[in-house]
């Protein structure tokens, strides 16, 4: 299932490139919810684009940067 794949990808990516955000979500007890929500949104958007005729890789290139592969926090290298 796409959402499960995207959740795992989000957690890895966010932990590496958005550690402050991950820490805030964990402290609030909301990390799993945020990861799951982002993964579900991404999967839904990718599926809609595929239904419109896009290839999966094309749809992911359009969707993942906004939902899963977020830009690094300042100072993270």
Image (cartoon, rainbow, N blue to C red):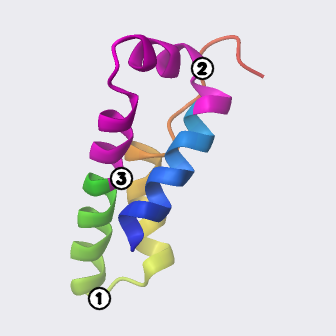
Q: Residues within 10 Å of mark 2 (few under 14, many from 20)?
A: some
Magenta residues: mostly which secondary structure?
Answer: helix
Q: Residues within 10 Å of mark 1 (few under 14, many from 20)?
A: few
The residue wearing badge 3 is 39
Residue range (magenta): 15-39
Q: Residue at x 29, y 36 (%)?
A: 33
Q: Which of the labelled discs sits on residue 53, or is there none?
A: 1
Q: Quadrant of residue 30?
A: top left
Helix, strand or loop at label 1? It is loop
Residue 59 sits above or below residue 34 on the image: below
Q: Residue at x 34, y 13 (%)?
A: 28
Q: Say which quadrant the C terminus sits in.
A: top right
Q: Residue furthest right?
A: 77
Residue 53 sits above or below residue 19 on the image: below
> Which one is in front in this view, the residue at disc 1 or the one at disc 3?
3
Residue 39 is left or right of residue 17, and the answer is left
Mark pair 1, 2: CA separation: 36 Å
Q: Say which quadrant the N terminus sits in.
A: bottom left
Q: Which of the labelled discs sits on residue 19, or is there none?
A: 2
Residue 28 forms part of the magenta stretch: yes
Tag 2 near tag 3, CB within 8 Å: no
Helix, strand or loop at label 3? It is helix
Query: First in sequence: mark 1 or mark 3?
Result: 3
Residue 33 sits above or below residue 63 on the image: above
Helix, strand or loop at label 2? It is helix
Residue 17 forms part of the magenta stretch: yes
> Which one is in front in this view, the residue at disc 1 or the one at disc 2?
2
**x and y percent of residue 7 in the render?**
45, 52
Query: First in sequence: mark 1 or mark 2?
Result: 2
Q: Nearest the camera: 65 or 33? A: 33
């Amino acid at each position: 299932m796409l959402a499960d794949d995207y959740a795992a990808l989000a957690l890895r990516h966010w932990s590496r490139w958005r550690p402050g955000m991950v820490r805030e979500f964990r402290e609030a007890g909301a990390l799993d919810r945020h990861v799951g929500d982002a993964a579900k949104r991404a999967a839904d958007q990718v599926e809609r684009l595929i239904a419109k005729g896009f290839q999966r890789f094309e749809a992911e290139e359009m969707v993942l940067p906004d939902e899963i592969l977020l830009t690094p926090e300042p100072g993270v290298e």
